[in-house]
């Protein structure tokens, strides 16, 4: 069972995530900022905004596709491998480095 946590709505964990191509097509008109669509696998794409923020994060740090968000977003902050940036020990976890590298690679 996955624990629940109280999100602070800071947007710090809301960066580019892979979407299946059909899922992205279903939601692309809800994007809140310009993006570059980057292939991730044969069946996934990643919409990447220049800011590094998720393209579906609005000006109030709320997800405009929250009800239908990807599984990785649902697990953020509730499993140890995807810690909340406000969790104690976050900076010592491998997540910030891996995530930062992924964003850098996608923006190249």
Image (spheres, helix red, strand yellow):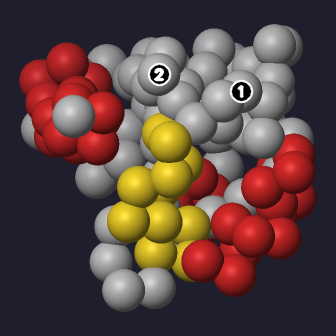
User: Which residue is at a point 66% across and 30% down the rendered structure image?
Assistant: 34
Q: Is residue 59 above or below residue 84?
A: above
Q: Is residue 75 above or below residue 35?
A: below
Question: For mark 1, what is the residue?
Answer: 33
Q: Is residue 35 above or below residue 9?
A: below
Q: Position of residue 102 (x, y in %)?
A: 23, 42
The answer to whether residue 6 shows anywhere in this view is no
Locate residue 55 relative to residue 49 in the image: left or right. right
The answer to whether residue 23 shows anywhere in this view is yes
Q: Is residue 89 above or below residue 38?
A: above
Q: Secondary structure at mark 1?
A: loop
Q: Secondary structure at mark 2?
A: loop
User: Which residue is at a point 69% across and 81% down the rendered structure image?
Assistant: 22
Comes first in the chain, label 1 or label 2: 1
In the image, which disc is placed on residue 94?
Answer: none
Locate residue 41 relative to residue 84 in the image: left or right. left
Distance between the alpha carbons at the discs numbered 1 and 2: 9 Å
Question: For mark 2, what is the residue?
Answer: 50
Q: Position of residue 46 (x, y in %)?
A: 47, 56
The image quadrant where one finds the N terminus is bottom right
User: Which residue is at a point 53% across and 30% down the rendered structure image?
Assistant: 49
Q: Position of residue 18 (x, y in %)?
A: 47, 62
User: Which residue is at a point 41% across and 55% down the rendered structure image?
Assistant: 38
Q: Quadrant of residue 100?
A: top left
Q: Position of residue 79 (x, y in %)?
A: 41, 55
| Count of numbered badges drawn on the protein | 2
Q: Which residue is nearer to you in this view: 106 or 71?
A: 106
Query: Do the numbered discs 1 and 2 sit on residues whose CB atoms are within 8 Å?
Result: no
Locate residue 64 relative to residue 25 in the image: left or right. right
Mark 2, Cα crowd under 10 Å, few <14 / some 14-19 / many 20+, is some
């Amino acid at each position: 069972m996955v624990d629940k946590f109280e999100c602070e709505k800071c947007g710090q964990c809301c960066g580019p995530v892979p979407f299946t191509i059909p899922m992205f097509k279903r939601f692309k008109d809800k994007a809140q900022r310009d993006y570059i669509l980057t292939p991730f696998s044969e069946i996934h794409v990643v919409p990447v905004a220049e800011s590094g923020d998720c393209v579906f994060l609005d000006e109030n740090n709320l997800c405009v596709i929250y009800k239908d968000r990807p599984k990785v977003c649902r697990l953020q902050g509730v499993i140890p491998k995807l810690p909340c940036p406000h969790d104690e020990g976050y900076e010592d976890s491998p997540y910030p480095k891996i995530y930062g590298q992924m964003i850098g690679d996608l923006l190249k």
